[in-house]
Image (spheres, grey):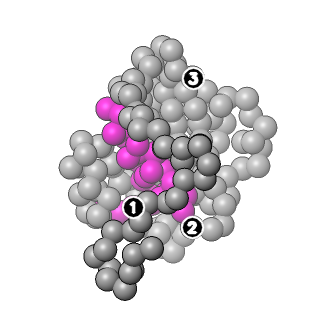
Amino acid sequence: MTDRSDPLTPPEPPARCGSRKAPVPKRKRPGPYRVPPREQRHGLVIVNTGDGKGKSTAAFGILLRAAGRDMKVGMWQFVKNVDGRYGEHVAAERLGVHIVPLGDGFTWLSENIAEDRALAEQGWRVCRDALRGGEYDVLIFDELTYPLRFGWLEAGEVLEEIRNRPRGTHVVITGRSAPRSWSRWRIW
């Protein structure tokens, strides 16, 4: 046994036990991953909801992975102020990802509810057109649950649009208080 008081001294190889060799880890490299064409994919609807943190962060993870696989990704943010330029917008631009703020900040603190409703309706029209257009592989509707919960958007209409999305298109919805009935819908 060598003196290990010198940290630069390499460790001794382990002693062999009998005639068996020590297992060697596989040195396999992952092969290229090919995203199937949209017609061959089953489009998912993912709802990130709950009282804790991490809903939008999880959606950003999906955005990042999809962009890494050369999928066309778009994100529409119902609460973020239209005039704001946030860190995620700068990062998304560098990745070639489309993020659009549609709101006016924290709407539940607003004094002009009619204006907030109009912003939500206008924002949903933009989202609906993107959903129908079929340009995107992944669409993220960040904080969509708020205008639905406040009654500013018709939940049935939103779900119908999602149900009729182009084949193979993934949709991610984030926000607190998603309707419990969504877990029983068979649109996903």
* Real-space Cα separation, disc 3 to disc 2, in angstroms: 28 Å
Residue type beneath disc 1: Lys
Q: Residue at x 49, y 60 (%)?
A: 14
Disc 1 target residue: 80
Residue in front for this viewpoint, 19 or 12: 19
Disc 2 target residue: 53
- Label of residue 42 in the image: 3
Q: Can the viewer see residue 73?
A: no
The mark that comes first in sequence, 3 or 2, is 3
* Real-space Cα separation, disc 2 to disc 1, in angstroms: 16 Å
Position above or below: 118 against 21:
below
Task: State the SS at label 3.
Answer: loop
Residue in front for this viewpoint, 1 or 157: 1
Magenta residues span 54-83
The mark that comes first in sequence, 2 or 1, is 2
Q: Where residue 46 sits: x, y (%)?
A: 59, 41
Residue type beneath disc 3: His
Position above or below: 13 against 120:
below
